Image (cartoon, grey):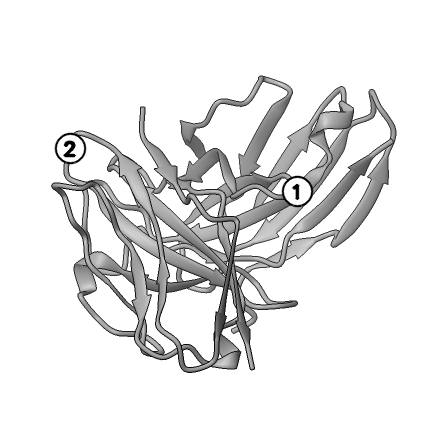
Amino acid sequence: AQRVTQPEKLLSVFKGAPVELKCNYSYSGSPELFWYVQYSRQRLQLLLRHISRESIKGFTADLNKGETSFHLKKPFAQEEDSAMYYCALYTGGGNKLTFGTGTQLKVEL
Amino acid sequence: DAGVTQSPTHLIKTRGQQVTLRCSPKSGHDTVSWYQQALGQGPQFIFQYYEEEERQRGNFPDRFSGHQFPNYSSELNVNALLLGDSALYLCASSLFAQGAFLAGANVLTFGAGSRLTVL
């Protein structure tokens, strides 16, 4: 069965420091990976998806099939990046996503 | 476009009661999925509706049922409520994807959720 693991419940970094939010998945086929973000008092929303190979708000994520990872990275953290981040896996057949438990990112001044 | 709208926003029920939650999808979307998010957890897939039929179901008991209407809106019904059903229930709309990686598909637009408390 597919599974998404986000090992850190809370990640605290200083403003301007690099950020890496870890995500590992378990799936033997060709996955599609997403990062969703939830800012305080806002809805869960898509941040980026691996097939788009884009950078959103300075964040990037590379799918590493060998390590089954999809870590989210940003070179310089900003205060407005403080939020809850969820990694999600799509394995085909309908629109079911499997979410990780989320990582709370706190950017301190 | 108001996006995905859900009602009610909060509700309190007692064990054994039944609850109905409602969802209107984003304009242009034809698929509605429901997720349960318990405190401190990520969203867990309950089921998905497309063309008024349940297309996929997660690991939830039959007490959880749903419906989709011709206008694509949807309801989630939970019978015989348990304390453990207390959670945020999220509705998400999207375009139906028959296969993988269709452009614009598999991207979920979430509602603000309905917070259910079972006493």
Same subunit: marks 1 and 2: no
Q: Quadrant of the N terminus of chain A?
A: top left
Left or right placement of residue A95 versus residue A63 in this view: right
Residue B79 in the image, given as x and y percentages of width and height:
72, 23
Residue B106 in the image, given as x and y percentages of width and height:
31, 51
Badge 2 density bin: few <14, some 14–19, many ≥20, Cα 10 Å: few
Residue of label 1 = B39
Badge 1 density bin: few <14, some 14–19, many ≥20, Cα 10 Å: few
Q: Amino acid at mark 1?
A: Leu
Left or right placement of residue B101 versus residue B18 in this view: left
Q: Secondary structure at mark 2?
A: loop
Q: Amino acid at mark 2?
A: Gly
Q: Is residue A42 above or below residue B58?
A: below
Q: Is residue B8 above or below residue B42?
A: below
| Subunit that carries the residue with mark 2 | A
Residue of label 2 = A29
| Subunit that carries the residue with mark 1 | B
Left or right placement of residue A61 versus residue B50 in this view: left
Q: Is residue A22 above or below residue A65?
A: below
Residue B67 in the image, given as x and y percentages of width and height:
56, 35
Left or right placement of residue B105 versus residue A21 in this view: left
Q: Quadrant of the C terminus of chain A?
A: bottom right
Residue in view at x 41 percent, y 77 percent: A77
Q: Are marks 1 and 2 in contact (CB under 8 Å)?
A: no
Residue A78 in the image, given as x and y percentages of width and height:
46, 81
Badge number at residue A55: none
Residue in view at x 23 percent, y 32 percent: A27
Residue A86 shows up from this direction: yes
Q: Secondary structure at mark 1?
A: loop
